[in-house]
Amino acid sequence: MIKQLIAFAMILYIPLAIKLSSYLLYKPMPVIKTHVRRADIVDSSGVLLATTIPTQSVYIVPHEVLERDKIVDDLSAILNVDRQKIDARFNTKSKKFVWILRHIAPWQANAIEQLNYSGLYVAKDVRRFYPLGSLFVHIIGRVDDENNGISGIEVAFDSFLKNSNQPLKLSLSVPVQSVVKEVLDEAKAEFGAKAVYGMVVCAKTGRILASYSQSENFDVNPHEQAQDAVNLNTHDVSERGSVFKLINAAMLLENGIVDLETRTVCPVEYKVGWHYVHDPDKRAVECVYTFEKGFSKSSNVMLSILTFRAGIDKTVDFLRLVGMFDDMKIDSLSVERGLFPTKWTMPQCQTSSYGHGIATTNAQYIRAVLRVLTGYDRQLHILHDYMPSQEKRIISESTVRKMRYLIRIAFLNAWYGKQGEIAGYDIGGKTGTANKIINGKYVEKHNLCNYVFAFPAHDPKIIGVLCVDEPHATAKTHGYVMSSFIVAPLAVKLVKKIGPILGVVAKV
């Protein structure tokens, strides 16, 4: 009988003993879904832009916690996190484990392990690290805590990055990007601008060498402070102003509406629809412009008159030819669509000639310029090793040659060109200042200032566009908020710095 009772007790309590011992010997581990395997991202020279590094993360098993207040106090001190935020993590007892903080420093992990509290654990983890901090954050994007891409390059090439053993090599150049950042950040501070952004592209291949955008500089590396940065070059759809005259001028030349010496009588004001168009120089008398001079003086009146002669079909067809209406992607990187009239009228065509009433991203615009200044249906690329396809000529060589001449003359005839000419670089460019729409109305001095440039102008190797959003007038700008005083000088400064880096010299 006694032997039977002992046997019965063993059968009854052995499972309980095993369960109790498992609590003593088994250390619960969270099910980490992190994608450990994620390829590096590098620039065109192999400089590391993003990589995956081992880290540690702290978590709790709520039903094992016996000294909650002590754990909260100690973690708050070690992790430098508000006590209430940590305490709130303890209120989900139905879960097997709860993350307190992901990706902590090694010294923090060691300090937590030394506490030896019941229910408090440190687990091995991985995280994405961006060695250059804020330099590329707006275009590289970031990942979530499970190492899945959620913005920028990280999401556009997420599948490749998860499955490749080789790094993703981009066309971007760290030295060029650094100069663009330096020049634009200085301008943002000097003019108190809302945002600054710009792109630099290889004219021969369409590869993007730099794409910088900044409304607020921040480092994406502290994951607990991570936020998504908006790439203004691909996602800010805005009116660009007179930089669009470069596109319209090409349309007029290509369709034989004008030649460089074509003369146009330009009144002081010219009625388009219900509105009157004026020129930026505020002249008081009617004059006659050659097409070359009118372009150089950025005449709204001349281009409005000539666009009327061209007609709706030719105007819209040319915008389509240079890709304005496309669903655009830069390899796999998404680009917002532009905003255009659903049904074009003549007044809309005329105002579009100087960039009014139509809106695009920088990426859309610079691709159109790339096509106008090369004559080919060239695409933008962010991958260094893309395989180029056969390009089709879409604009005549004669028009391309004349457009290169016009942007060179426009640069030389401007004050910033006369003062900023750099021997050997032959810069060409066009200004654009667009009033912004606030509460449904165009507002003076709330401007987006743009400048598009190319060098050497007679055979462009580099094309770029710079934007300063809502700058403020200073003594240096003589009280004006215009591209010619704010952004054009930045382009001269930029060319002077990146020209030697890229080895681009036209002649000496």
Image (tube, rainbow, N blue to C red):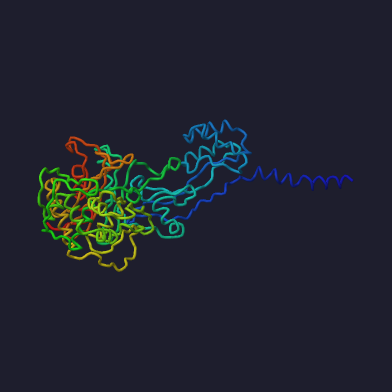
Task: Classify residue 504 as left or right of residue 386.
Answer: left
Q: Residue at x 22, y 48 (%)?
A: 432
Q: Nearer the viewer, residue 456 or 128?
A: 456
Quarter of the figure that contains the C terminus = bottom left
Q: Is residue 483 above or below residue 77?
A: below
Figure label count: 0
Task: Classify residue 117 as left or right of residue 492.
Answer: right
Q: Is residue 406 above or below residue 468?
A: below
Q: Quadrant of residue 380?
A: bottom left
Q: Quadrant of residue 196?
A: top left
Q: Is residue 466 above or below residue 162?
A: above
Q: Residue furthest front?
A: 274
* Residue 97 position within the rendered picture, expressed as x and y whole percent measured from the top left: 59, 43
Task: Classify residue 240 as left or right of residue 279.
Answer: right
* Residue 161 position within the rendered picture, expressed as x and y whole percent measured from the top left: 43, 57
Q: Residue furthest bottom?
A: 390
- Does residue 498 appear anywhere in the picture? no
- Does residue 143 appear anywhere in the picture? yes
* Residue 437 position within the rendered picture, expressed as x and y whole percent measured from the top left: 30, 42
